[in-house]
Image (spheres, rainbow, N blue to C red):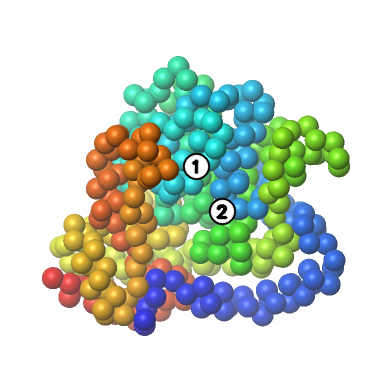
Amino acid sequence: MKYPHLSLKRANEPYMAEMKAVAAEVIEGGWYIRGKYVSQLEELLCQYLGCRYAVATGNGLDALRLMLRAYIERGVMQPGDEVIVPSNTYVASVLAITDNRLVPVFVEPSVDTYNLDTSLIEQAITPRTRAIMVVHLYGRACWDETLKSVAARHGLKIVEDNAQAFGAVSSVAGLQGSHHTGALGDAAGESFYPTKNLGALGDAGAVTTDDREVADVVRALGNYGSAVRYVNEYKGVNSRMDDLQAAFLLVKLKHLDEENRRRVEIARLYTESIDNERLILPQAGEPGEHIWHQYVVRCTERDRLMRYLESQGVGSLIHYPIPPHKQQCYREYNHLHLPLAETLAHEVLSLPMSSYLTDDDVHEIASIINRFA
């Protein structure tokens, strides 16, 4: 295929020599889990986002799970409490909630942003609501004054699923003054899965927060529940980042802003070049608000469009074909009808998006799309 949806080999080529060098350093150093590279990464994540604490985890789902678990251990939440979550998200957002025996309350997205519609949050709040989980889907920040005021009025925590938007900023300041996703709310889960804008070469994640107690509990929970060796305060798990992945991320973090700027340019070229009334194109929002982890179009004949693109050598993916409330693992929610999330699941299609794409590549892909009839 001439234009695969994503080639990780091509995406990592600019950093390959430096990553090989740091891999040798890690191997020769002899400390492979929660060593100096993990510590350096945690420090630089804080500097980049403008938060006080970062705790590296084994993966992004664990980051979300441990973040919520920390609130339970601190008595802020308890099993049976409710967490508002967008109906249009990857299932991991919901898995983190139910894994902690919390109850997801699905709220529909905005038709313009595909993120949580903050105007619908208040009507979903009940006496058992304890938190709002915002998901910065596809790389676009989900944050506004409505969200902040509703959370403050009802005494709710705001937790972020920042798996797809590391580097995005909101024009509206977060609770502690930062404008970066991942440091807007009370705590956030980050994913550094290889396909992300800031991607490792394996699983990796982090919890970021300004709350020292949350950070301390997350760190202990991810280390078998132990802050002091062989003293187990919590019934924890094993979720610790390898130094090798931290070293790779340190290399790539230096280039993240450049990577995101190129993605913004590619998205602009797509939007200017695609001219087909069968497609609905995504909106960019305010400057810096969208860092284009995915460029997602909508089409009522999505499956036919996908087959057509494949026949023309253009790869695409569906993010996501089944909304969480319709998944088999959530049969107890299958009866819910959330029309916008369900419509999006049948219409969205992600086009090739990576900084290695040239302007000519984008124009050719757009030309192919424009011939779809």
Marks 1, 2: nearer the viewer: 1
Q: Give the crowd class for mark 2: few <14, some 14-19, many >=20 residues within 10 Å.
A: many
- The residue that disc 2 covers is 191
Q: Quadrant of residue 318?
A: bottom left
Where does the image place residue 60, in percent across and percent down from the top left? Answer: 57, 51
| Left or right of 167 in this view: 73 | right
Q: Residue at x 57, y 43 (%)?
A: 64
59 shown above or below 20: above
Residue 146 shows in the view? no
Q: Residue at x 74, y 61 (%)?
A: 243
* Residues tagged 1 and 2 counted as in contact (Cβ below 8 A): no
* Tag of residue 80: none
| Left or right of 199 in this view: 357 | left
Of the residues shown, which amino acid type is indicated by label 2? Ser
| Left or right of 14 in this view: 313 | left
Residue 76 shows in the view? yes
Q: Secondary structure at mark 1?
A: helix
Where does the image place residue 273, in percent across and percent down from the top left? Answer: 26, 71
- The residue that disc 1 covers is 95
Query: Which one is earlier in the sequence, the residue at label 1 or at label 2?
Result: 1
Where does the image place residue 41, in percent across and percent down from the top left? Answer: 70, 56
| Left or right of 50 in this view: 288 | left
Where does the image place residue 28, in percent across and percent down from the top left? Answer: 84, 72
